[in-house]
Every structure is written in structure tokens, then in C-alpha cells.
Amino acid sequence: MGIKKFDRHSLTLAVDTLNSKQLVAIPTETVYGLAADAYDDTAVARIYQLKQRPQFNPLIAHVDSLEMAEQLVEFSPLALQLAKTFWPGPLTIVLPRQVDSQLSHLATAGLDTVAVRWPQHPIATAIITRLGRPLVAPSANPSQAISPTSAKDVAAGFGDKAPLIIDGGPCDVGLESTIIDMTVTTPTILRPGGITAAQIKSLLGDVTVAKSNAFIKAPGMMRRHYAPSKPVRLNARAAEHGETLLGFGPEYDSVNNLSPKGDLCEAAANLFHMLRLLDSHSNCQKIAIAPIPNEGLGVAINDRLSRAAAG
Ligand code: TXA
Ligand code: MG
């Protein structure tokens, strides 16, 4: 679709593209983001597919107001103070998920916390406002590559797989947002970025800075990640006593099936909400999962499933 300068036509095109579950690369003040409708599992699965992430790293939900953020997360008084001071801007706040939030469970990798940010970029917020929903957006680069700070960087990174790119010129900050976890007793900076630790400390007082950025380099090592409370058995061809089988592909029952047509993107989109569903079924004591091909998005699906099976 190529690079489009921002104007009212490309705004409409961007919103139409997002509404049809496709991705759009958008400028923010930090770096360009690869954006998808935050409420749509299929759109979110396309992010992981295009970035070729071997794991489901949780994504940041971008909003255009405090009001929109409050539909996703629960603010403590301290978190609210933080948001009111630094938003819009390069600060991402991790907060407990609102129970009735429509946010894709794939976007949060099944976590009960959500990273949320109100960016300070008129194009990013214009698109969110027109869509009327939050956008999840990791940096718009293939996994392992450097974050893009111009439309050209995004195009170069993805080559002929590049999505629609809205050109907003170079990014002002050029460095990702600071991430602060407000779900722990002492607020903890998980990733240094556009807002400094000193700026945050002057407001909150007691703040911990997470050691190194092992956290970001190895998302799988995250302190908390979602796993079903029930035992999980992998590579199952049939259910044994007390088990409920979660299939993949046409040879399995279509009721509990990650993708009856055997599509990995559809399977990724269904993964977390189907695991949650089976986890809450009273007649399911153990979850048996059919083999998933270990290619493309299947690598990230198998990574998550093997963690779930390991307990
Ligand atoms: O500046 C930015 O933050 C850019 C622009 C596009 O907004 N976005 C960005 O996204 O850097 P990404 O996906 O590259 O980095 C998001 C980070 C990841 O390290 C992820 O693990 C962390 O946020 N994260 C997301 N949800 C989290 C959660 N619930 N708890 C802890 N960390 C979370
Ligand atoms: Mg990144």
C-alpha cells in the first residue's frame, strides 16, 4: 500500500484499513508503531505474524484520552496523578485490566495487566479518535531489528510485506516510551525511555528501576505470564479421561478448535480466549491440545503452550 502523507484522505484510508482488521504503521512521538484495532484478535495476530516474533510479547494499548484509558484499566490515585502529569507523552503505565474491557487477550498475551499510553502525536491520536477504539502498536520493525523513526525506515524494514504507512515525518523523541509498572507495591520502571526516572521520582517519590533490561530482551522471562490453572497436555491426538481436547485443523471436532481450517493466524487469534474458556469450564479437568505445526505463527503458539504445559 506504500507510504502516504497524512491528510484527510489518508486518515480515512487508515481507519478503513484498521476497521478491516489490517495493520497500519503510524507515527508517534517516540517511534513508528505497527498498529492494529486493540479489540480484534485477528488484527492483533497479524502484528505477530508480520513482526515474526517467536513469542507473544504483550503490546501497548494506545489511547486518545484518559477516558479511553479508563475503559481498559483501573487507575489507582497515584497512577492517575502520573497519567495527568505525563500524558499525552512517552510514558507507558502498566495497570490492572478492567474486567469488562474488550481488549484482545492476544494483545496482552493473556495477562491481567495492561500497558497503556496516550501518545503525544496529532496523527496517532487523530487515527485513534476516528476509529473510536484504542490501537495496540509495537514498534514497526521486524523482530530483532532497530525501532523505526521515519516512514522510510518502516518501509525498508518490511520490504514488500510493508503495510500502509502514514508518514508524519521523523519522530521527535526517537526512543521508545518509558514503561512503569504500577501494579506492584513500589512503582517499578521496567524500561527506560522518553520520560526519565528522575522526572518520575520527583512526582512519586519511591520508585524502583528494574535491573538491566533483561525483561525486554527476554519477554518469556516475564515475572508474570498467563497460564491456565489446569494441567495442559501437548501433542494430543484424542482426549483421555477428564480431558477436554483443544483441536487444530479439520481432523478435529469444530467446537473446541483453534482453527478448524488449520490457519495459524486464526489459531493465534483464538489461543488466549479459548484457553481461558476451557480453564473456566467446570467439566474440564485437564486441557489436551492437538499438535500445532512449528512454523510461522506456530512457533509463538508452541512457545506459549510449552510454558503452559510446564506449569
Ligand atoms: O514508544 C513506544 O512505547 C512504542 C510506540 C509505538 O508507542 N511502542 C513500543 O512497543 O515500544 P513494544 O511492543 O516494542 O514494547 C512494548 C513493551 C514490551 O517490552 C512488553 O513486554 C511491555 O511493553 N509490556 C506490554 N504489556 C505489558 C504488561 N502488561 N506488563 C509488563 N510489560 C508489558
Ligand atoms: Mg520494540
Image: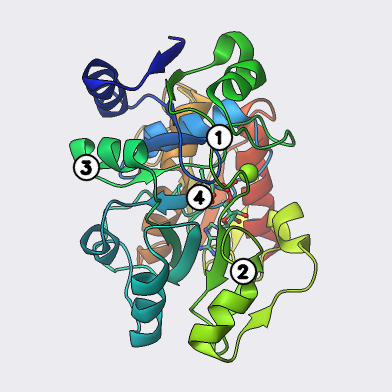
| Residue drawn 54% across the image and 31% down it | 170
| Closer-to-camera residue (83/109) | 83
User: Could you tell me the amino acid type at mark 1?
Assistant: Tyr
Image depth: mark 1 or mark 2 in front:
2
According to the picture, the residue beneath numbered tag 4 turns out to be: 59
Mark 3 vs mark 2, CA separation in Å: 28 Å
| Residue drawn 22% across the image and 36% down it | 131
Image depth: mark 2 or mark 4 in front:
2
Q: Which mark is residue 48?
A: 1
Image depth: mark 3 or mark 4 in front:
3
Give the SS element for disc 1.
helix
Contact between labelled residues 2 and 1, with CB atoms less than 8 Å apart:
no
* 126 left or right, relative to 294: left
Mark 1 vs mark 4, CA separation in Å: 10 Å
Q: Please rate how many residues cluster around mark 2, counting C-alpha atoms within 10 Å: few if below 14, some from 14 to 19, many from 20.
A: some
Mark 1 vs mark 2, CA separation in Å: 29 Å
Residue 189 quadrant: bottom right
Residue 293, visible in the rendered structure = yes
Image depth: mark 1 or mark 4 in front:
4
* 258 left or right, relative to 51: left
Give the SS element for disc 2.
loop
User: Could you tell me the amino acid type at mark 4?
Assistant: Leu
Give the SS element for disc 3.
helix
Q: Is mark 4 within 8 Å of ligand 1?
A: yes
Q: Which mark is residue 129?
A: 3
